[in-house]
Amino acid sequence: MSGAFKIKFYSDPGHGWGAVKRQVLFDLGIADKISTFSYQKGDTVYLEEDCDLPTLTTALALKGETVEWDERNTNNRSPIRGYDYFKA
């Protein structure tokens, strides 16, 4: 990884999640630090905004990466809430 790391950030009226590929968590060595408050679907993990997303951004900063955000907001309940809970 080099340069700006792009994260899609999804939010609904109650919460938000940053979407990243599952392999990124393993590449950074943080997969075991991600809680079950995050979700997964396919090879994408939706990191909850309060604890797990900062774990990612801190790991990226330690690698010299900057983050570029792509925000997606809805006034409805996000379908992310229905995805499977994250398991490393």
Image (cartoon, rainbow, N blue to C red):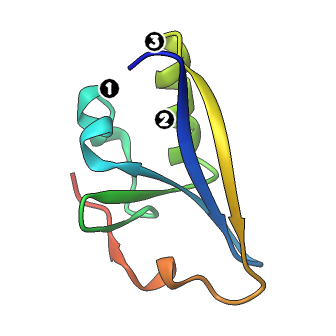
Q: In the image, is residue 45 above or below residue 31? A: below
Q: Amino acid at mark 1?
A: Leu
Query: Residue at coordinates 62% horizontally, 56% vertically from top-left?
Result: 9
**Whole-Å distance between the Cαs marked 3 and 1?**
9 Å
Q: Amino acid at mark 3?
A: Lys
Q: Position of residue 18 (x, y in %)?
A: 55, 53
Asked which quadrant contains residue 28, the reply is top left
10 Å crowding of disc 3: few (<14), some (14-19), many (20+): few
Disc 2 vs disc 3: Cβ atoms closer than 8 Å? no
Disc 3 vs disc 1: Cβ atoms closer than 8 Å? yes
* Horizontal arrangement in the rendering, residue 71 relative to residue 7 (left or right): right
Location of the N terminus (image quadrant): top left
Name the residue carrying label 3: 63
10 Å crowding of disc 1: few (<14), some (14-19), many (20+): few
Name the residue carrying label 1: 28
Of the residues under marks 1 and 2, which one precedes in the sequence?
1
Secondary structure type for disc 2: helix
Q: In the image, is residue 17 above or below residue 11? A: above
Q: Position of residue 42 (x, y in %)?
A: 24, 67
* Horizontal arrangement in the rendering, residue 19 relative to residue 78 (left or right): left
Q: Nearer the viewer, residue 12 or 34?
A: 12
Name the residue carrying label 2: 56
Disc 1 vs disc 2: Cβ atoms closer than 8 Å? yes
**Whole-Å distance between the Cαs marked 2 and 3?**
11 Å
Asked which quadrant contains residue 48, the reply is bottom right
